[in-house]
Image (spheres, helix red, strand yellow):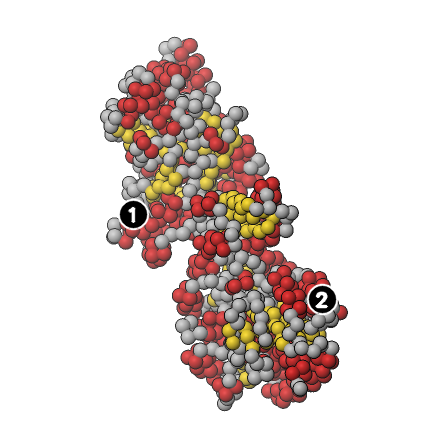
Amino acid sequence: MISKLFKQDLNVVNIGLASFKESLDSARVQVVHMDWAPPIQVDGAALRFLRSRKSAIEAANKRVLARILAGRPSLIGLGKALDAVPGMKKNLILHAGPPITWERMCGPMKGAIVGALLYEGLAGTREEAERLADSGEIEYSPCHEHCSVGPMAGIVSASMPVFIVRNEEFGNHSYATLNEGLGKVLRYGAFGPEVIARLKWMEKVLYPTLKAAVERLGKVDLKSIIAQALHMGDEVHNRNRAATSLLYRALAPAVVRTCGDAETAAKVLEFIQGNDHFFLNLSMAASKAALDAGRGIENSSVAVVMARNGTDFGVQLAGTGGDWFTGPAAVPDALFFPGFSKKDANPDIGDSAITETGGLGGFAIAAAPAIVQFVGGRVADAFDYTRQMYEITAGENNVYQIPGLDFRGTPTGIDALKVVSTGILPFIDTGVAHKEPGVGQVGAGVLSAPAEPFRKAVEGLAARMSKGF
Amino acid sequence: MLRKGAIRKGEYFDSVTLMTVGRELSGMRGVLDAAVVMGTRENRAILENAGLMVPEFSSAGEADLMVAVKAVDEKAASSAVAAVDALLDAVKKRKSAASPSEARPRSLDAALKVLPGADLALISVAGRFAGQEARKALESGLHVMLFSDNVPLETEIELKRYARERGLLLMGPDCGTAIINGAPLGFANVVRRGDIGIVAAAGTGLQEVSSILSCEGAGVSQAIGTGGRDVKENVGGIMFLEGIKALAQDEGTKVLLLVSKPPAKSVLKAVLAKLKTIKKPVVAVFLGAEPELLKGTGIVAAQTLEEGALAAVLLSKEGKKGLASLKKVLAGRRKQELSAAKKAGSRLKKGRRYLRGLFSGGTFCAEAQVLFKGRLTPLYSNAPTAGGMALEDSLTSREHTVVDLGEDEFTVGRPHPMIDYSLRNRRILEESKDPAAAVLLLDVVLGYGSNMRPAQELVPVLREAAKRVAVVCSVTGTPQDPQGKLAVEAALRKAGAVVMPTNASACRLAADIVETLEAP
């Protein structure tokens, strides 16, 4: 009843002109000013339909979030991609992001594929490799369609060793390659002799050593490592120093015990300790295993994948099956290595946004004050970004927490409907590759996901629901 | 001469901020014209018309910011574009430095967490987004004041029906002002609290009556704005009726004061039916309506905002019997006006014989036409009503002309004339130089949201104009307004203007002056 309003204190939400807030302030009226931005424009009929099914969507989202949070990812072993990864074949190359053809691939992805073909011995030179890649003999498929994730170009070929992660709660598995380190590396599109030699060493030395060590341990609880690392200044996407150290601590005794040769054991441990990002591929696989358990719950608008192939940015929702919703990937705002600038940068690339999808990375940036240079230089900026993300997630994490926010759970489970209605786009930490093949990494930074995939995802959800799935 | 454009991807600023930046740019050395606008279709058309379109803008989306500069040379253009970056970055920095993001929620859900007791949303975002925001607010159980204009009619109807179902107020769209529980919303004056409840489908009309009655020592319980379209056939007066109902139930309201242009027939019927059930005295100002319409209804029918406000004051102070003195009060004012007219008319040069009204408030422009009907002919306006005829070119007056400077043709891409005086100031000087112009009639609207330095900005122009024509104004506002009505009136008088207590009184005086000239 309207006349009831006249008996209570007026408390105003001001949406729009800031001067109206100032007027209310000076009249001593309680007012909060909303930092409004235009929402993403979604087809009106789709929006009305989704509004009419609000309770079904909310119930589905609750279920998806509960499953994501209940996940218990553990590293349970290592294997060769050909043997371990579902659907893997000798002439199949997995890549980051949504599906893409060779012609549309960006420079660094092409470079990484050239490197993979050289590594597999399927080609002897760059030219040969490029011909083969374009010949139709090689098939391409997104990592995500094989329960896998790959940072940057995300290239996985048959002989590459992979981590095997199991979601202990639901029994599903995920896979990721081993991290090569920074600089000139395959995942950034470099394919020189030193890159191939390193991959060979990883296959011949690193892989068997770690495989034996993990077998000895039985499993390594990744969820607990990530939770601890967040308390130690990582967001486990652009900063993995703490998580890598924790992993090292878990692995080292087993490596020493299982490796017959002391020098080999030392080399393997040195490799891990020399690469602050060694844990990244595991934080990605852990996120993937947790999110995959939320897949296939109809009516849900929660994202289970955000991934980029350097050309397109793709999103998948829990409630839209295997459909990809894509839009052009943007070039990140970054800090560049000396000699490089934004004009060298490739558009956003990699499956690593799976960490943000799972409530880590950019969503947990407030846990990582050491890397605030990427977000404007002030710790307050990092807190702002994380706080904003709470406005577009289905909930908060029960295990991953941010000390600086009084141990509040990280914002988890991106709700595409909230993204379009608030216009707040998911905030992603990322590395930056050179746009030409063969060069490698040129910087690291942050960016917001593009709006288009989320608009399409919401419209896709409406279409699917109205067909009566 | 060259044009230069830049896009800032995905950056959003409110229109007032952008217009302020645009104005600063236009004032830079070597800059001929500039605009800083969001990349909407409407804005592209504006840039196209202004000769500010550059090919780069073809890639700008609705959520991107377009910066357009026309300058004498490359250097001036580049430094202007750079200045935009600096200005906007400063705005952003101020914003983030002002408060932590907890206090700067970006969604309604987050805002409601910051202020859990929120009961009203004041929405002033661009019209095409406003409906969606209003819907969200209503769904969250908030009353809504929708300041935004350009909200589609169907959206308005849908929102109002939904609000009525849920027992919520939806004021607007295009509701410029309201006062709820004493809080000034949008453009509003600092008025006394009291027992007069107002429902108005005319924004400046509401400001005028609430200011007048406050200056007369009475006060406002609630002032509900409905937006002008509410009383039209297709909306059916949904909120006008809900407002009346709410005030009828409100213990703090003793007298109802209704303000509107004449409602549609069906709406008027519904309003009268509703009023029949109400025991509280009701005053209605349906500007331009035939007095017969309300005959026999027991409603006090007022011809002007002034009369309506004074009637409500008398009812509030003395009850029904107080109304007897209304005629006397108005007659007293009339006497003053006539003697002032003689004085002002005698100082004018021969050949000057026309009235030129330049209004920032739409209701005032309408009230002027109602009062001039049959007195000043021919009468032209860009917003014709009552006896006024359509003015072909809004920028060029002819014979007797009254212009509403708040109409779209003047406000697209620039602040409302109550905020930004530059356009009207230019026009004041122009009109005064027309050898046929005799009287310049102006409104000055004070209060929150309006220009904060009205006297300083008007005085130099009025002083100049008053050398040639008679300047007549009224100041809408109260001594408690941030600008201070008394100080503003004194400054305008000193500049040579005749300042009347109300718009109606100013209009009558203006017509009186013209009549002294036309008399043979």
**Residue B129 falls left or right of residue B182:** left
Inspect the image, locate mark 2, and give the three-letter code of the amino acid beneath it. Glu
Residues A279 and B470: in front is B470
Residue at position x 30%, y 19% from top? A128
The answer for which chain carries disc 2 is B
Q: Quadrant of residue B352?
A: bottom right
Residue at image mark 2: B464
Inspect the image, locate mark 1, and give the three-letter code of the amino acid beneath it. Glu
Residue B181 position (above or below residue B285): above
Residue A113 percent location from the top left of the image: 33, 25
Q: Quadrant of residue A451?
A: top left
Residues B379 and A454: in front is B379
**Residue B174 falls left or right of residue B448:** left
Q: Which mark is residue B381?
A: none
Is residue B360 visible in the rendered structure shown here?
Answer: yes
Is residue B178 visible in the rendered structure shown here?
Answer: no
The answer for which chain carries disc 1 is A
Residue A13 percent location from the top left of the image: 53, 58
Q: Quadrant of residue A454?
A: top left
Residue at position x 41%, y 13% from top? A265
Residue at image mark 1: A298
Residue at position x 55%, y 45% from top? B2
Residue B63 percent location from the top left of the image: 46, 49
Most extreme residue toward the right is B494
Residue B490 position (above or below residue A438): below
Q: Which secondary structure lies at badge 2?
A: helix
The local crowd at label 2, few if under 14, some if 14 to 19, many if 20 or more residues have their Cα within 10 Å, is: some
Q: CA distance from mark 2 to mark 1?
A: 73 Å
Residue B99 position (above or below residue B485): above
Residue B476 percent location from the top left of the image: 64, 71
Residue at position x 39%, y 9% from top? A261
